[in-house]
Image (cartoon, rainbow, N blue to C red):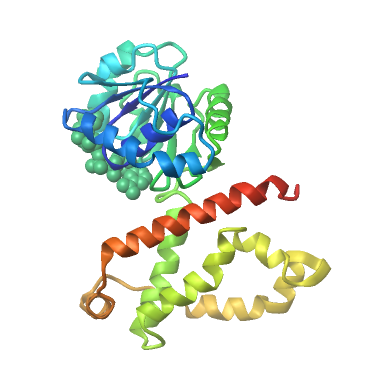
Amino acid sequence: MNIAVLGSGTIGQSWCALFLAAGHQVVAYDPDPAMEASIIRFVNASKSALQSLGYQSAGTLERFRFSPSASDAVQGAELIQENAPEKIDVKHQLFSEIEPHLDPRAVILSSTSGITLEELQAGLKDPSRIVIAHPFNPPHLIPLVELLGNHETDPLVMGRVRTFYESLRKVPVELKKSVAGHIANRIQAVVWQEALHLAREGVASLADIDKAIANGPGIRWSIYGPNQLFSLAAGDRGLEGFIEHLGPSFQSWWSEAGRIEFDSRTLEIVREHVEQSAGDLEAMKAYRDELLLKILEAKNAVSKGEPEK
Ligand SMILES: NC(=O)c1ccc[n+]([C@@H]2O[C@H](COP(=O)([O-])OP(=O)(O)OC[C@H]3O[C@@H](n4cnc5c(N)ncnc54)[C@H](O)[C@@H]3O)[C@@H](O)[C@H]2O)c1
């Protein structure tokens, strides 16, 4: 498939690496010409991780071209993954530049984290051909892609988009309506708020709260989400049995959950944590990436046998 990647920073480069690894033809555009070399470095650097995840064409650059023009990059492209800066006027300007050059069946997939679909559509003459396809960083490794269309979206487009990401072995989830932060970032935000709240209340240090998450629920969450996990935790009656058993406790914890601001007290706790946990950031990143790859490899290997629901 011919794919255009518009905006080749953190997210665009990572998408390029994955699309190429999956055997697609990729033309990338970025107004900064230095990004061509940057994409090539990224594709080379991500080769071994993508190879170990089974992408046959990982690291290949034969089907890659960098274009200094957005309108040229989208010529003949069936899909356009848009990763321009998170500013509505920049995205609209880009849309008005490319729209006259799009193939009739071309679909724009926006990586936006926070701009609504309606705001994006306002910059297009044909709003039916854009979908939000929000990745989790880095998109070449993390499977989740959050999809959102609306009443303007061509009904066939959502199906095509879902099939495309599944063909890359991504895990697309579809939002039924627009909400700030989509799904996963909203959940992360609530968990982080409670972590900071507990530290503010003197219950535990941020370091211990991180340990509690990473060595407890975090490990299980990479297998199933809380709804599925809890339905396995109360015998034959599944999730309803769990609610009967532990629902009242959860309800009391919900009522005590904190709402905090990034005020001076929170920032003081964060500063203290940064001082106490200072370490070799590069070594920590390498550890994170090594373990992430092992988790993804394990999920690939074992999920072949994941039970049907
Ligand atoms: N960084 C993340 O963790 C993350 C995660 C998910 C989604 N996103 C979304 O992805 C998009 C890109 O974010 P990023 O983190 O890669 O930003 P970035 O700043 O790393 O990259 C943006 C790139 O766009 C280029 N650019 C500038 N003007 C442009 C234009 N007119 N047309 C095309 N490209 C242009 C810049 O030169 C830069 O290379 C945003 O919409 C963001 O919300 C980011």
Name above or below for residue 66 compared with residue 131. Answer: above
Image label count: 0
Name above or below for residue 11 compared with residue 198. Answer: above
Comparing 292 with 45, the one in front is: 45
The residue lying furthest to the bottom in this view is 202
Relative to residue 282, is residue 166 drawn left or right? Answer: right
Name above or below for residue 149 compared with residue 23. Answer: below
Instruction: Kindly identify the residue that appears in the image at 33 percent across and 64 percent down.
Output: 284
Instruction: Kindly identify the residue that appears in the image at 32 percent across and 35 percent down.
Output: 83
Instruction: Kindly identify the residue that appears in the image at 62 percent across and 81 percent down.
Output: 249
Comparing 241 with 219, the one in front is: 219
Residue 215 shows in this picture = yes
Answer with the quarter of the image where residue 41 lies: top left
The x, y position of residue 73, in whole percent, is: 30, 18
Residue 114 shows in this picture = no
The x, y position of residue 271, in whole percent, is: 22, 76
- Ligand 1 quarter of the rendering: top left
The x, y position of residue 163, in whole percent, is: 58, 29
The x, y position of residue 68, in whole percent, is: 20, 20
Relative to residue 100, is residue 160 drawn left or right? Answer: right
